[in-house]
Image (cartoon, helix red, strand yellow):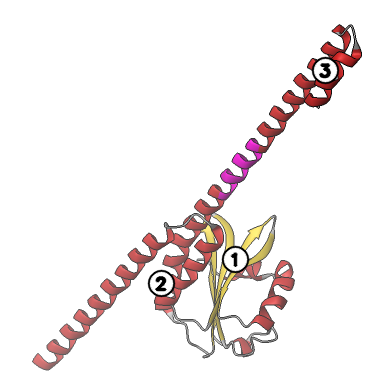
Amino acid sequence: GSVEDYTEKKLHENHLKQRNHELEILQHIAKSLGVSLDVKQTLHTILEQMQQIVPFVSASIFLLREGQLEFLADMGIPLEAKARIIAAAPTFATIPRLMAESADNIMLIADVAQDVDWHTVTGMEYVRSWMGIALQYQNEVIGIMNLDHNEANFYNENHVRYAKAVAGQAAIAIANARLYEQAQGEIEFREQAQNILIENLINTETLYWVLRHLFEAKKLAEVLPHVLNML
């Protein structure tokens, strides 16, 4: 009985250590994701941090723009495959399938060779198991993260739990970066509009000055050099 008690105690201690380690990683990920407000830098950080807690051979992130998936970040995807993925991304039906088949917006394919709907991209024949995680912000899917592994049946329930935790933080970081990018674009637009308005006002004042002096001038030859300088 004492041996069994000791074994159970050690298992419980190891489990607690593992969970504490996972929590530390997730806290570190949360801090890392708040560092940059650049969208592409944020996406790259997400993949770097995800790899610490959910192993993958390759990974990618697609964001939804006007109803279509756009390939924006990856790790480990061969160059020959990347161009094909970028070209095909708008036609992908991953999100509708993921939403239909998964209540928690995470979908696993244990062995892609056994999945009739799986389409192998040339250059990515190494993929055997796949996990797709919908990136959701305020109950709206804003993108999807794909994790690929070269071993069939690689991903388990723990991987799913970790991926879901990281994806939740990632979606917030992406939304913040997008809002910042949008705000910066609006600021630049306002500055451009302001500069155009100022230029138009200056041109209007210059034109008014030219016309006034031309009309008031008794001798055109006297005022013409000044007019030409203003123009």
Which residue is label 1 attached to?
99
- Say whether marks 3 and 2 touch (CB < 8 Å): no
Quadrant of the image for the N terminus? bottom left
Which residue is label 2 attached to?
162
Distance between the Cα atoms at labels 1 and 3? 67 Å
- Specify the quadrant of the image occupied by residue 156: bottom left
Q: In this picture, which residue range is highlighted in magenta?
A: 181-191
- Specify the quadrant of the image occupied by residue 71: bottom right
Residue for point 83% across, 12% down: 213
- Specify the quadrant of the image occupied by residue 183: top right
Residue nearer the viewer, 164 or 78: 78
Amino acid under label 3?
Val
Q: Position of residue 113 (x, y in %)?
A: 63, 90
Amino acid under label 2?
Tyr
Disc 1 residue crowd, few under 14, some 14–19, many 20+, Cα 10 Å:
some
Disc 2 residue crowd, few under 14, some 14–19, many 20+, Cα 10 Å:
some
Of callouts 1 and 3, the N-terminal one? 1
Quadrant of the image for the C terminus? top right
Q: Horizontally, is 158 left or right of 181 in the view? A: left
Residue 89, numbered circle: none
Residue for point 72% across, 30% down: 199
Q: Position of residue 31 (x, y in %)?
A: 37, 60
